[in-house]
Every structure is written in C-alpha cells, then in structure tokens.
Amino acid sequence: MIKALEFERAQVDLAATLRQLRIAANLTGEELGRRVNISQSKLSKIERCRVVPSIDDVRVVASALGASGSILEHLMQLAQSLQENAVSSVAAAFRCARQDRYLMLEGEASVYRSAETYVPGLLQTPEYTRHVLTAFEFAAVQIVELEDIVVARQRRQAILVDLRRSFRFLISERAVAMPVVPADTMAAQLDRILNVAHQDNVEIAVLPLGVVSPIAYFFGGSFVILDSDLVIEETLCADLEIRQPESVATYEDHFNASMSIAITGNEALNILRNYRDDRSIDLRWHRPAEKVPQ
C-alpha cells in the first residue's frame, strides 16, 4: 500500500506527462478523444487528477501521443501503481494538509453524504474538534498542528451556506450517547447541529442504538460520498479515496440502506435535543428498546 503523498505524486506525474505529450503533439483534448475513443471530459479529468485512469486508457492514450521507450514504460508503471493501491496516509484525517484537500474535493461536489463514527467534520464546533483530535493520541498521532487543523476544519464549513449544494448527514446515536467529549462540549456541539439542521439544503438522520446497519457491519468506520464520483473513508490509520464506479456504488447502496432504518426529520432532531438538554443520560438509552426499529 503506498502512502497518500506518494499516490498523489504519482497521479500528478502521470497527469502532467500525458498533458505534456498532448501539447507536444499539438492536439486538443477533443481531437485526442476522437483518436482514442475516450471523451474529452474524461481526458480533462485525467489531466486534472480528478480521475484515476485505467491501465488500458493510459496505454491507448500514450501510444496515440507517440510515447515509447522509457517514457511509455514509466507511464505504465505509474498506471499500474495507481490501480493497485488505494490512497492511504497514516493519521491522514488529522493532518492540516488533508483538511486542505477535503476543502478542494468538497468544493467540487454538489451532493455530500456522510456516515461517520463521530460528529461529522462539517458540523463540528472548534472545541469538539480539539477533544476528538486529542483523544487519538493513543494512535501514536503527534498533533503538533492542532490549532491549524481546527481552523482548517472550520474553514471547510463555509460550504454549508451554499444552497446550491445538498448535505445528508447520518449520525450514529452512539456518538452523542457515549461521547468522547465533556458534557458541556457535547451540548454546544448538539446546538450547532440543530442550528444547521434548519437549513433547507441539510438533512440530519440518526442511526439508533441497538440497530445493526450495513455501514457498521461491512465498513465499521466513517466515510463521505461526494456526488457519485468519490468516497473518502477514514480508518484508524488510513484515509482512503475510492473512485472506481462499482466501489462507489457499493458505498451508495449501503448508505441508502442505513438511511432507510435511520430516524429522520423532527424525530431525529428531538433525539438530539433530548441529549443536549439532559446530560444525565450520557450512558443510557433515551427511549425503551422496543421502540428501536428492527
């Protein structure tokens, strides 16, 4: 498994080399697309690192552009490496550089769907972020840039006010029933979520305690789906970017299945209000077990 920085360098190298070859051949993207039977849009995304091309695509494009010898061999090695490796970076979720990358990726998406173990980053208060990042010191993460990350995460949240975009947040009830932050911090965090929930472009759903969702069973972690093009999955020590259409579709299916058993609308917001207003139920269910959907 190659690290995220290495993956990104390889993708940039591949994209830049193909672009230079196309310019040297005096071809537009549209002209090249006709030659290789690949759409101009896809070629543009490859050159802008929006799409990881298949090995066959790289071979066909490179050959059409006259690449040979060491250049062709280099391109094929890059393509092979990119296809075989998911983007991974130790403690990537907690690095300021990753926050900047999230800002870029989120800015290109119109539909944002989130299923996360903790409160989603786009909804976090600064104090909640500080506590969550500090809690991960057991994972050998040295958070020397803590305040920079807090500021970067807050900067990302500006996208929420763009009513041209839609946001669906699936929040585990466990995240608020058994929080990793003090009660007053959690209460302020829940206030933040409830305020954002009033926006027309935001939907908040709560996955109840006691319900085993496809997300928990198959993935066990947190992930975000941007449009239908990209999944970002956070694990304890890796940050995966998944672009293969069939893989993205699998995440969409399991997200939708979990949404179908989640609590939504005013009922979901009432659950969050109950936790905000009565912190004596920190470690207890807020309603009888028989009311939990099966």
Image (tube, rainbow, N blue to C red):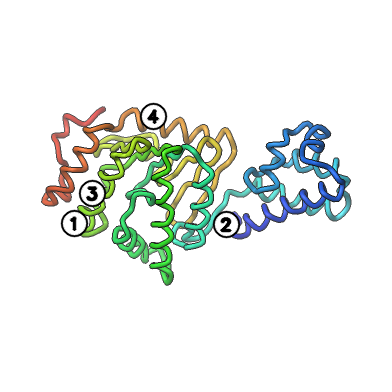
Q: Which of the image's four quarters has the N terminus?
A: bottom right
Q: Which residue is mark 2?
A: 4
| CB within 8 Å, label 2 to label 4 | no
Q: Which residue is mark 3?
A: 191
Q: Which mark is residue 183?
A: 1
The Cα atoms of the two marked residues, 2 and 1, are separated by 35 Å
Identified by mark 1, the residue type is Ala
The Cα atoms of the two marked residues, 2 and 4, are separated by 30 Å
Q: Which mark is residue 257?
A: 4
Q: Residue 213 appears at what percent x and percent y?
A: 34, 35
* Front disc: 2 or 1: 1
Q: Exactly how many numbered labels are in the figure? A: 4
The Cα atoms of the two marked residues, 3 and 2, are separated by 35 Å
Q: For the point 22% across and 54% down, which residue is it?
A: 188
Q: Nearer the viewer, residue 137 or 223?
A: 223
Q: Residue 227 appears at what percent x and percent y?
A: 51, 37
Q: For the point 53% across and 58% down, which residue is it?
A: 89
Tag 3's secondary structure?
helix
Tag 1's secondary structure?
helix
